[in-house]
């Protein structure tokens, strides 16, 4: 799967480009996040965060998603990697000026 994701990176527009110090080549710098999806992807989130050096994470979700099996998988993954987790499960789909008060 990772090979397929890397193949799609060639279609990403460079964030910036400049001429090298030799003046012969154009250098492109890409700033892109990896996207991982498919069966089992959620169970790897804790591993990824630990690999990135995270120690404490916050999860933003709404009350309905918080009750789904995917949330249990996520929380198990974070716990398995000894991450300090804070869950905010009162996110609204469309925030309004009232919801910010």
Image (tube, rainbow, N blue to C red):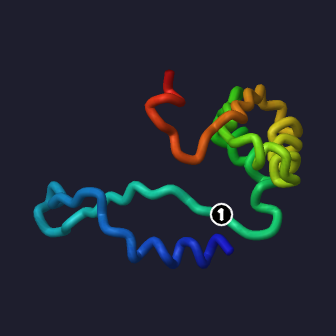
Q: Nearer the viewer, residue 87 or 65?
A: 65
Q: Name which residue lies at 19% across and 68% down.
A: 25
Q: Nearer the viewer, residue 17 or 35?
A: 35
Q: Is residue 14 left or right of residue 34?
A: left
Q: Position of residue 30 (x, y in %)?
A: 37, 59
For residue 40, what is the image quadrant?
Answer: bottom right
Q: Position of residue 92 (x, y in %)?
A: 61, 41
Q: Nearer the viewer, residue 23 or 46?
A: 46
Q: Position of residue 11 (x, y in %)?
A: 39, 76
Q: Is residue 49 left or right of residue 20?
A: right
Q: Position of residue 5 (x, y in %)?
A: 57, 72
Query: Badge 1 is on which residue?
Result: 36
Residue 47 in view: no
Q: Tell which residue pokes out farthest to the top in this image.
A: 101
Quarter that holds the N terminus? bottom right
Q: Is residue 7 left or right of residue 47?
A: left
């Amino acid at each position: 799967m990772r090979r397929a994701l890397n193949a799609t990176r060639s279609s990403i527009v460079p964030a910036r480009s400049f001429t090298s110090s030799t003046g012969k080549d154009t250098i492109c710098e890409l700033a892109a996040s990896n996207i991982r999806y498919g069966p089992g992807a959620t169970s790897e989130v804790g591993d990824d965060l630990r690999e990135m050096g995270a120690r404490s994470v916050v999860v933003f979700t709404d009350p309905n998603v918080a009750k789904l099996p995917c949330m249990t998988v996520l929380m198990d993954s974070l716990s398995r990697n000894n991450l300090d987790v804070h869950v905010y499960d009162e996110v609204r789909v469309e925030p309004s000026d009232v919801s910010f008060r």
